[in-house]
Image (tube, grey):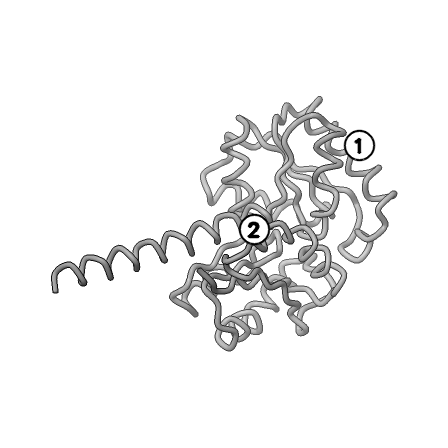
Amino acid sequence: MSGRILVINPNSTQAVTDGLADALSAFQVAGGPAVDCVTLAEGPPGIESQQHVDGVVLPLCAMIEREPADAYVIACYSDPGLHAARETTDKPVLGISECGLLTACTLGERFGVVSILATSIPRHLRAVRQMGLWDRLAGDRALGLGVVELADRTRVFSRMTEIGRHLVEQDGADVLVLGCAGMAYLREDLQNAVGVPVVDPAQAAVTMALGRVLLNRASQSASHARRASAE
């Protein structure tokens, strides 16, 4: 089997895309779909407001139209343009927030979200309510750092550990979700520090994308086999 899963970073910070590529390198398996991480050049340096979310929808959909793939992953925790993108193509389109939260529900009873900025939290809470997961949310706490500041590993990890422990010890979370694609490189370190499962939403989304591609290929093979036997 071959093919392609296109992971789109809708902000223009190449370091975030590079971090995604590193975090998703384990999904590059022999004979499987290529996992290609690309940057949306038209995007802002970070998706940090509703205006940013709304502003990338059209260029994001345009990229999906011109870039052929077996599945697409929108690698921003605000899932910008998710529903519009699903109208743009008949291929699977997955948002990392949706996939990260659903994965968290398979690993624990109540999840906590580690956000970047306090202004991000209202968007996250809307998404949780819309997905019907409000009763599973333990809390959502912010690092107080913007996307472009996430490259400072020492500073980010110190703050992330503090926030993660608050979510576990004070809010009652038994699983954490990283609320930004730029945090992927610290998932394992944070999990070791707080002692509960930590979900990187981009990894969760690519896992689901692989499953959708495999299921589609299996269905096609079964259909071909039925037609061949009928002949």
Where's the N terminus, which quadrant? Answer: bottom left
What secondary structure is marked by label 2?
Answer: helix
Q: Nearer the viewer, mark 1 or mark 2?
A: 2
14 with respect to 52 (left or right): right
Q: Which residue is mark 2?
A: 96
Residue at horizontal 66 percent and vertical 27 percent from the top = 196
62 with respect to 178 (left or right): left
Query: Which mark is drawn over residue 148?
Result: none
- Work out whether residue 171 or residue 215 is closer to the camera in this orientation and state it: 215
193 with respect to 30 (left or right): right
Where's the C terminus, which quadrant? Answer: bottom left
In the current view of this chain or complex, which residue is farthest to the left? 230
Q: Position of residue 143 (x, y in %)?
A: 77, 42
Q: Position of residue 118 (x, y in %)?
A: 72, 45
161 with respect to 68 (left or right): right
- Work out whether residue 154 or residue 49 is closer to the camera in this orientation and state it: 154
What secondary structure is marked by label 1?
Answer: helix
Which quadrant would residue 7 be assigned to in this image? bottom right
Q: Which residue is mark 1?
A: 162
Tell me the crowding category of disc 1: few under 14, some 14 to 19, or many 20 or more residues within 10 angstroms, Cα based: some
Q: Position of residue 171 (x, y in %)?
A: 66, 25
Label 1–label 2 contact, CB within 8 A = no
Count every numbered label the image shows and give the total.
Answer: 2
Tell me the crowding category of disc 2: few under 14, some 14 to 19, or many 20 or more residues within 10 angstroms, Cα based: many
Q: Position of residue 116 (x, y in %)?
A: 73, 47
- Quote the CA–CA distance across marks 1 and 2: 24 Å
The amino acid type found where label 1 is placed reads Glu
Residue at horizontal 50 percent and vertical 30 percent from the top = 135
Residue at horizontal 60 percent and vertical 64 percent from the top = 36
N-terminal of the two: label 1 or label 2? 2
The amino acid type found where label 2 is placed reads Ile
